[in-house]
Image (cartoon, grey):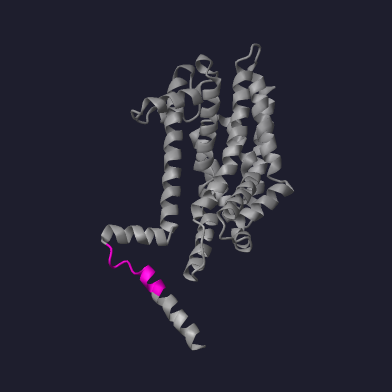
């Protein structure tokens, strides 16, 4: 190696050593510098707190829904929810829960209720779908750590997460529109209980059939193998990483949108079914076998047929 190149390399190494040396900082400064240098801890904390808050919000909504149904006999699981403590919450959260649980717009607040329903579905997506995206996010962090060690520029993983969640925010708006339409249909005159059962059976039928589709298999394959996609599309530009997160979110939506329809059959705010769907998607994406997918599809189809028979 020429002398001038060796000098430049030594100077670069000295600069790198100085950049990584935080001994001149106090304890708090060293902790903050370490977090800034390796963002994985920040990502884990943000995602963990987000999932926890989403579940707490959904649980609080479900408890208030169970209390409101107490006089009418309730729904499965309401007894457990009614015995859970009801924590005092700020007024705006109580208003949010009331808008989510109301079968019709309150005081003509259609826009507010629509926004609340979008927020509710987004919380459901964060609670049930974001845990299953953890392997994809972890894979990005591992590639980013390797690039950072080599001295290459790296986009913060939260940019990828933002792209992923943007897809589910758009999907939440569509699910909220379906919920709003269902509320309007339920409040119209002449609605019979069999119509509700038939609508639920249709949702289960669509979800069950989709479990056997080629599109489901293709999307699931993409979700199970994030490394090749992330590595081949690696970029140091935030816009491209955001689009990469969008792509991963689209694959995840393509894999799981039909399962979200099950909530229309069991009750949109059924927190127990939310947990079951979240657990199933996590298992489904981590298992190479197609048995869980097809087994779930068969169960949904049988359930749809039984509900259709009972409704008629």
Is 5 situated left or right of 14 in this image? right
Magenta region includes residue 272: no
Q: Nearer the viewer, residue 24 or 160?
A: 24
Residue at position x 38%, y 25% from top?
91
Q: Is residue 6 above or below residue 254?
A: below
Magenta region includes residue 24: yes
Q: Which residues are magenta?
A: 15-25
Q: Is residue 199 above or below residue 53?
A: above
Q: Position of residue 3 (x, y in %)?
A: 48, 88
Residue at position x 28%, y 63% from top?
25
Q: Nearer the viewer, residue 25 or 49?
A: 25
Q: Quick check: can you spot residue 173?
A: yes
Residue at position x 53%, y 60% from top?
139
Residue at position x 43%, y 81% from top?
10
Q: Quick check: can you spot residue 65?
A: no
- Residue at the outermost right position: 214
Q: Is residue 4 above or below residue 310?
A: below
Quarter containing the C terminus:
top right
- Residue at the outermost front position: 4
Q: Is residue 275 above or below residue 26?
A: above
Q: Position of residue 126 (x, y in %)?
A: 51, 42
Q: Nearer the viewer, residue 312 or 20?
A: 20
Q: Position of residue 277 (x, y in %)?
A: 55, 42
- Residue at the outermost left position: 26
């Amino acid at each position: 190696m020429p002398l001038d190149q060796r000098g430049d390399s030594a100077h670069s190494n000295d600069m790198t050593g100085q950049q990584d040396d935080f001994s001149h900082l106090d304890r708090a400064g060293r902790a903050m510098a370490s977090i800034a240098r390796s963002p994985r801890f920040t990502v884990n904390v943000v995602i963990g707190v987000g999932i926890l808050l989403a579940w707490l919000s959904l649980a609080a909504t479900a408890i208030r829904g169970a209390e409101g149904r107490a006089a009418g006999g309730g729904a499965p699981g309401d007894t457990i929810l009614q015995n859970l403590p009801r924590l005092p919450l700020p007024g705006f959260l109580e208003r949010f829960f009331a808008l989510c649980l109301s079968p019709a717009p309150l005081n003509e607040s259609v826009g507010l209720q629509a926004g609340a329903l979008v927020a509710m579905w987004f919380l459901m997506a964060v609670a049930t779908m974001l845990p299953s995206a953890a392997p994809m996010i972890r894979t990005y962090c591992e590639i980013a750590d390797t690039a950072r060690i080599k001295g290459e520029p790296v986009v913060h993983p939260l940019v990828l997460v933002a792209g992923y969640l943007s897809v589910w925010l758009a999907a939440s708006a569509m699910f909220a529109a379906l919920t709003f339409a269902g509320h309007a249909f339920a409040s119209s005159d002449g609605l019979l209980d069999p119509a509700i059962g038939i609508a639920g059976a249709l949702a289960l039928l669509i979800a069950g059939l989709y479990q056997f589709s080629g599109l489901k298999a293709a999307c699931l394959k993409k979700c199970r193998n994030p490394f090749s996609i992330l590595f081949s599309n690696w970029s140091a530009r935030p816009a491209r990483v955001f689009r990469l997160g969008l792509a991963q979110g689209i694959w995840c939506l393509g894999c799981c949108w039909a399962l979200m329809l099950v909530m229309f059959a069991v009750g949109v705010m059924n927190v127990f079914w939310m947990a079951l769907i979240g657990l199933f998607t996590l298992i489904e994406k981590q298992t190479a076998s197609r048995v869980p997918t097809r087994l779930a599809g068969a169960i949904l189809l049988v359930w749809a047929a039984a509900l259709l028979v009972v409704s008629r």
